[in-house]
Image (cartoon, rainbow, N blue to C red):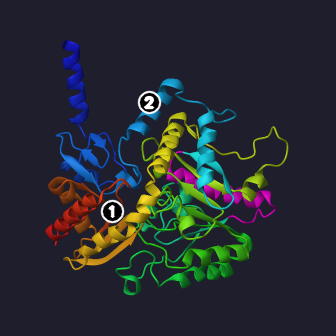
């Protein structure tokens, strides 16, 4: 009886901590959060739950990652079974079977000859890994001068020094010095005057890819290793690519011998209705970075998928010598691999990518019912993603969006992402039509409340 009482007290203490000071929370307004916490302690399918048991409808798939929903039994069991069998195996000079199985399954989903997978643990690590591979590839092919990296304004590639160097979100860069030398940036693809209230890919903007020619002329192609872009810029507020834009980037990269890297940390594993957005747009990049949806957020995992020719460039020299001096202690962690395999099986068996495809039009219809509400400047949709731009308050950029997030959670039982004054929605793929209606109804109430 005493032991049970102690166990209940410990569980209650964990759910209701009396000291919030120690955790310096990432990408969070810490003082505002700790003054009025948005605490969650449990999740299942489409909902989170507060310590008091209040249901919170998940309109953002956690952090763009819980694509198959929360605490799916198949994924949970796979993790439990793996933990009981093999808790950890080093991936430096050793391996375990599930890692090879998962790599093969991911390569099968990727387009073209993207046949090799290098595992890491987060989108940030994946971005830096891809950039390092690109520079090393130049060295190995007798083009060691190719060290310059090209990103895009408003791009997000994680928080490593490589990722923020090619990234283009000002707040992510300005505190951290000069970062990697030699990085340059394409212009972003968003123009509200030309693209406002576009469904899917906007008609205007493909010509912006030609700015890569200007950058090449400025620096000379022989100095450039790679171009990294998100097919859909997600973290900056959901910016779908203009029609033809990505194909034009591929053509210019081919012309000048530049590697093209797609950051699919958000778009990978079904978010646009395809395994990878590269398939949706008919473009085969040289590398794809992934994370988030590969395990439906259950265990951290990420990676880089690499084309055959790039991999082959490293597979030379004496066989006993390490080909790429790079990796992470937890690359291909057994629990992550078990979660990934169960997640990929869930996507396949429940046809969740196809489900997103089938819902794209009705999702857009629902989102566009918000057009005309107070302060709504633009709405964008793609696959099962949507964004609403709200007008900023004078001298208080981001305040309206922050207040909308707070009101949604506390007053309406809804979670979504905010970037400044943009509300971003990306529900799990198991969302029902009724739940889509519930999400949009609650967003409408929030928008009116923060008018």
428 vs 149, nearest the viewer = 428
Considering only vertical position in the picture, is 121 above or below 154? above
Highlighted magenta segment, given as a residue range: 121-147
Residue 418 placement (x, y as % from top left): 31, 62
Please tell me how many numbered marks the rendered image carries. Answer: 2
Q: Does the magenta stretch include residue 122?
A: yes
The secondary structure that dominates the magenta segment is: helix
Instruction: Report the front residue among 257 and 115.
Output: 115
Considering depth in this image, is 169 or 81 the residue closer to the camera? 81
Circles 2 and 1, Cβ within 8 Å, touching? The answer is no
Q: In which quarter of the image is residue 181?
A: bottom right
Q: What distance separates the C-alpha of mark 2 from that of mark 1? A: 31 Å
- Residue picked out by circle 1: 425
Residue drawn at (46%, 68%) of the image:
233
Nearer-the-camera pick, 189 or 166? 189
Is disc 2 placed on a helix, strand or loop?
helix
Observer able to see residue 33: yes
Quadrant of the image occupied by residue 50: top left
Q: How crowded is mark 2: few (under 14 residues within 10 Å), some or many (20 or more)?
A: some
Q: Residue at x 73, y 56 (%)?
A: 308
Q: Indicate left or right for 54 with 275 as reference.
A: left
> Relative to 387, does residue 80 appear above or below in the rendering?
above
Q: Which of marks 2 and 1 is nearer the N terminus?
A: 2
Circle 2 is placed at which residue position? 80
């Amino acid at each position: 009886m005493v032991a049970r009482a102690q166990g209940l007290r410990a569980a209650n203490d964990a759910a209701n901590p009396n000291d919030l000071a120690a955790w310096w929370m990432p990408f969070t307004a810490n003082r505002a959060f700790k003054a009025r916490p948005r605490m969650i302690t449990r999740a299942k399918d489409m909902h989170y739950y507060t310590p008091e048991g209040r249901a919170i409808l998940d309109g953002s798939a956690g952090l763009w990652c819980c694509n198959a929903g929360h605490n799916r039994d198949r994924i949970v069991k796979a993790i439990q079974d793996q933990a009981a069998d093999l808790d950890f195996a080093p991936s430096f000079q050793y391996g375990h079977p599930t890692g090879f199985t998962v790599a093969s399954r991911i390569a099968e989903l990727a387009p073209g000859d993207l046949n090799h997978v290098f595992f890491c643990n987060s989108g940030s690590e994946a971005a830096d890994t891809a950039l390092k591979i690109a520079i090393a590839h130049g060295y190995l092919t007798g083009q060691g001068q190719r060290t310059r990296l090209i990103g895009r304004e408003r791009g997000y590639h994680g928080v490593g020094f490589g990722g923020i160097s090619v990234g283009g979100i000002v707040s992510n860069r300005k505190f951290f010095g000069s970062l990697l030398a030699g990085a340059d940036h394409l212009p972003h693809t968003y123009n509200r005057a030309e693209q406002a209230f576009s469904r899917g890919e906007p008609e205007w903007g493909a010509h912006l890819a030609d700015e890569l020619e200007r950058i090449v002329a400025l620096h000379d192609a022989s100095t450039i290793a790679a171009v990294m872009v998100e097919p859909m810029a997600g973290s900056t507020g959901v910016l779908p690519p203009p029609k033809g834009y990505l194909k034009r980037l591929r053509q210019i990269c081919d012309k000048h011998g530049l590697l093209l890297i797609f950051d699919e940390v958000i778009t990978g594993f079904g978010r646009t209705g395809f395994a990878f957005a590269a398939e949706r747009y008919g473009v085969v990049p040289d590398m794809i970075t992934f994370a988030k949806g590969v395990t439906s957020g259950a265990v951290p995992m990420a990676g880089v998928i690499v084309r055959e020719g790039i991999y082959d460039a490293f597979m030379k020299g004496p066989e006993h010598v390490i080909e790429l001096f790079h990796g992470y202690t937890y690359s291909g962690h057994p629990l992550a691999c078990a979660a990934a395999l169960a997640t990929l099986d869930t996507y396949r068996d429940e046809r969740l990518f196809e489900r997103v495809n089938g819902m794209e039009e009705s999702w857009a219809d629902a989102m566009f019912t918000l057009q005309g509400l107070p302060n709504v400047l633009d709405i964008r949709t793609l696959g099962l993603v949507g964004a609403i731009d709200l007008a900023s308050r004078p001298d208080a950029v981001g305040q309206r969006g922050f207040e909308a997030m707070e009101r949604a959670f506390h007053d309406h039982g809804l979670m979504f992402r905010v970037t400044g004054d943009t509300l971003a929605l990306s529900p799990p793929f198991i969302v029902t039509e009724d739940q889509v209606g519930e999400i949009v109804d609650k967003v409408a109430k929030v928008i009116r409340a923060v008018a």
